[in-house]
């Protein structure tokens, strides 16, 4: 069913959801439209709300009943999670309101880190606590380094299942006072670039 908008443009849909698999560099889609009015329509501009999204139009003027597409390319980069972008289409017609198109991309990660932060209460026994890193794709992973950026906490890597699951055990030297710590993680992904991430620990 076409969604009508001002100035006689009708869209197949004004909202599209995509899934980007781990390692995918770009996600592409089309927003299809048709001129349902009685006069030609001129599209003045197509803009996006982020440099990571490019929207291209084949031409600007569409005769009655003529159809067209806006080609959208979203650069995944190092993003993970859900990313929502807006494409604004401006019609060259007095009083015509801009049309907003919505793109939602669910970007799957190579691995998960749970939890991203651990903590101890002041005075609690400084026993080790785990951050679990688990592969979320067919690619094998390896946690090669876990380095505290400040002294006062130890970090060691424990292999649960080679290539699939690792524990990073964090243990503060003491819990007598409040403090915060950052741990730099280096995770190798077979066939991809290594990723450098941070986990966190608190005494509170």
Image (tube, rainbow, N blue to C red):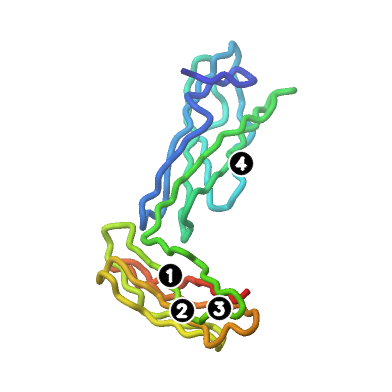
On the image, numbered disc 4 is attached to which residue?
A: 47
Check residue 170 in the rendering and tell me which mark sits there, or answer none.
2
On the image, numbered disc 1 is attached to which residue?
A: 131
First in sequence: mark 3 vs mark 1: 3
Quadrant in the picture for residue 86: top right
Vertical side of 170 occupied by 24: above or below: above
CB-based contact (under 8 Å), mark 2 and mark 1: yes
Secondary structure, mark 1, is: strand
Check residue 124 in the rendering and tell me which mark sits there, or answer none.
3
The C terminus sits in image quarter: bottom right
Give the distance between the C-alpha atoms of the residues marked 1 and 4, in whole angstroms: 42 Å
Check residue 146 in the rendering and tell me which mark sits there, or answer none.
none
**Given this view, does label 1 or label 4 mark the residue nearer the observer?**
1
First in sequence: mark 1 vs mark 4: 4
Vertical side of 177 occupied by 59: above or below: above
Residue at horizontal 62 percent and vertical 30 percent from the top: 99
Between 50 and 155, the residue placed more toward the observer is: 155
Give the distance between the C-alpha atoms of the residues marked 2 and 4, in whole angstroms: 47 Å
First in sequence: mark 2 vs mark 1: 1
Quadrant in the picture for residue 46: top right
**Given this view, does label 3 or label 4 mark the residue nearer the observer?**
3
Secondary structure, mark 2, is: strand
**Image location of residue 181, percent across then percent down:** 57, 78
CB-based contact (under 8 Å), mark 2 and mark 4: no
Give the distance between the C-alpha atoms of the residues marked 2 and 1, in whole angstroms: 8 Å
């Amino acid at each position: 069913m076409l969604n009508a908008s001002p100035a006689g443009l009708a869209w197949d849909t004004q909202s599209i959801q995509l899934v980007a698999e781990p390692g995918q560099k770009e996600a592409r889609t089309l927003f299809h439209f048709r001129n349902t009015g009685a006069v030609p329509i001129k599209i003045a501009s197509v803009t996006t709300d982020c440099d990571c999204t490019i929207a291209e139009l084949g031409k600007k003027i569409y005769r009655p009943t003529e159809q067209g597409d806006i080609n959208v390319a979203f650069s995944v980069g190092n993003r993970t999670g859900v990313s929502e972008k807006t494409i604004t289409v401006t019609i060259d017609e007095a009083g015509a309101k801009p049309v907003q198109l919505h793109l939602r991309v669910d970007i799957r990660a190579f691995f998960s880190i749970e939890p991203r932060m651990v903590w101890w209460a002041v005075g609690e026994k400084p026993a080790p606590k785990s951050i679990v890193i688990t592969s979320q794709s067919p690619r094998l992973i390896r946690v090669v380094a876990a380095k505290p950026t400040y002294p006062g906490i130890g970090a060691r890597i424990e292999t649960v299942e080679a290539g699939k699951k690792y524990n990073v055990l964090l243990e503060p030297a003491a819990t007598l006072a409040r403090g915060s710590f950052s741990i730099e993680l280096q995770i190798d992904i077979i066939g991809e670039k290594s990723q450098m991430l941070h986990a966190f620990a608190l005494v509170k």
